[in-house]
Image: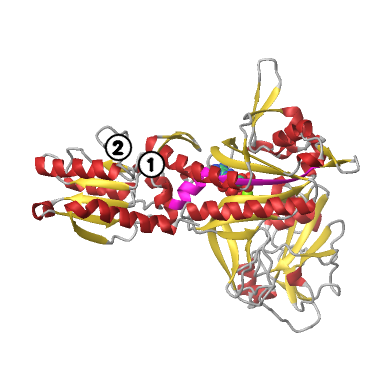
Amino acid sequence: MRFSHAFIPTLREEPSDAEVLSHKFMLRSGMIRLHASGVYSYLPLGWRVMRKVEGIIREEMDRIGGQEFLLPSLSRRDLWEKTGRWEEYGDNMFRLKDRRGADLALAPTHEEVFAEIASHEIRSYRDLPQIWYQIQTKFRDEARPRSGVLRGRQFLMKDSYSFDADEEGLKRSYVLHREAYLRIFKRCGLEVVVVRAHSGIMGGSASEEFMVPSEAGEDRLALCCGCEYAANMEVAVSVPVPSEGESRLREKVHTPGMRTIEEVSGFLDRPPSRLMKSLIFIAEEGPVMVLIRGDYEVNEAKLEREVGPFRPAEPGEVERLAKAPVGFVGPVELDGVEILADETIMDQKDLATGANQEDYHWVGLEPGRDFRVDRYVDVRTVKAGDRCTECGGEIEIIPAIEVGHIFQLGTKYSEAIGATYLDTKGRALPLVMGSYGIGMERIVACAIEQYADESGMAWPVSIAPYEVYLLPVNWGDPRTREAAEELYRELSENCEVLLDDRDERAGVKFKDADLLGIPVRVTLGRGLKEGKVEVRRRKDGETWEVPVEGAAEKVREVLEGLWEEVQM
Ligand code: ATP
Ligand code: MG
């Protein structure tokens, strides 16, 4: 491709609204343009990258026996009502009415629709197993669309669904997907960590996420320094940092105006780990008080698994339930509220917490002796320095981006939708399903996040928009032009070349080459007088001065090395 004919509208200026690298560089390189909040148009350079990712995904899905479908985005309400997700999806689902007043959704995912097809078409155990997939647009009205394409409201997903006769079959389909995903990420040049994950609104039992460590990520992972343990913070477990107190009698102390952990800790001169947070939430079944050691935070996803959907109590509700304002509440002699205690409270001595009286706290509390605990639970957010439950090693916390998520769903959808098959004895049994998603935009953005430097992107060769950037410094010079045209012809025989044939200043060309991040750059500059050109690898800046006749050969050799890095 000749740059003079290509539509690559690069921008010199920093886009003001882009915070993460991938967003900034995708805009500056002319890969994408914003259409509406969380909705982007792909321009030719961006779409080339997306299509390469798509190609890799398709090959790997086909390799495990996947069969490609294309299901509609418009989806009937009654189908989503069968699984309860018409309600459950809430504001995240885009909804519309047709001219007859019928409700439709723009599908955020496709478990229901695939399960419905299976319910009509799969008859017997002889039809199993099946792996069905599609690469298609998903719609989610995300609360906070941000970071460019990393969290869009319209995005491309490869989603697949497995149908098996039993749990064992499901495990096999799941492992096939797990391996396919590892191959996909490796081939796209991404380094991923596989972590245990929360199944959330998908339901089902086991699930794992594929995570790319990155400062731009909204997820937090707990990793063990001593073993393989890795989990999303939403499900991570740990042994808390120990904190011991001496048993003593309880005592009410005056703590005027001291509400927060920091204030009480300073005023009573005891570390946060010797305080107890007493928090009131309103769940669907009623109010609950959650007790947790002062040096830990309550994890929303973990608490939701214990009590269902919940919200923090309003100050007025707190006063009514505990007869004291926020900051002074506690479990001592508290009636009418279920009391859950995080495991960090178990067997503790000498805890301090609110006394259900304004400006007073208790000290010296022991669970069981001084207050009731209805149930011990694990609802804390793991923190750095905790110990691994498997090997005792130290836990570290890192930010990451979720690129893929695989779920063992079981029979949740097939039962709701009536997707059954006949087994060898002629009994009708529900299909056992798995569901597996990969975000296309996230792969692209993660590849940028992982390899970009301050001057631009540095694509893994397998998903780069072009493999070679041919940069004749002075296009006006006939000798340069002739040499460039010759090299362009030769290289184009077996690789993808972008020839910068613009009458631009050298500075502009070099800046664009760095920005676009094409893996190999060939510069035809001053050295051409001595018959030399420069071959440069984008990712590490390594440079070779080679005779112009040997340039194509050198480029192929460098490319080969790069391709080897992304081979399985
Ligand atoms: P998140 O927790 O980041 O909102 P999710 O868990 O809701 O994502 P899944 O339902 O597991 O996402 O979707 C499968 C894959 O689709 C994700 O692993 C991710 O790669 C991609 N994806 C999900 N939501 C978005 C989005 N808003 N924009 C871009 N890609 C997305
Ligand atoms: Mg997910």
Q: Is residue 335 left or right of residue 436?
A: right
Which residue matches tag 1? Answer: 27
Dot 2, how many residues are within 10 Å of its Cα: few (below 14), some (14-19), or many (20+)? some
Q: Is residue 81 above or below residue 301?
A: above
Q: Nearer the viewer, residue 109 or 354?
A: 109
Dot 1, how many residues are within 10 Å of its Cα: few (below 14), some (14-19), or many (20+)? many
Residue 230 circle label: none
Q: Are marks 1 and 2 in contact (CB under 8 Å)?
A: no
Could you say which quadrant of the image residue 72 lies in? top right
Instruction: Return the x and y of residue 36 as percentages of the image width and height.
Output: 48, 33
Q: Is residue 441 magenta?
A: yes
Could you say which quadrant of the image residue 128 lies in? top right
Q: Which residues are magenta?
A: 431-447
Which residue matches tag 2? Answer: 1
Q: Is residue 477 visible to the viewer in this orientation of the structure?
A: no
* Residue at mark 1: C-beta within 8 A of ligand 1: no
Marks 1 and 2 sit apart, C-alpha to C-alpha, by 21 Å
The kind of residue tagged 2 is Met
Instruction: Return the x and y of residue 532 as percentages of the image width and height.
Output: 15, 55
Q: Is residue 14 left or right of residue 58?
A: left
> Residue at left 76%, top 59%?
324
The kind of residue tagged 1 is Leu
Q: Is residue 100 visible to the viewer in this orientation of the structure?
A: yes
Q: Nearer the viewer, residue 206 or 245?
A: 206
> Residue at left 48%, top 55%?
190
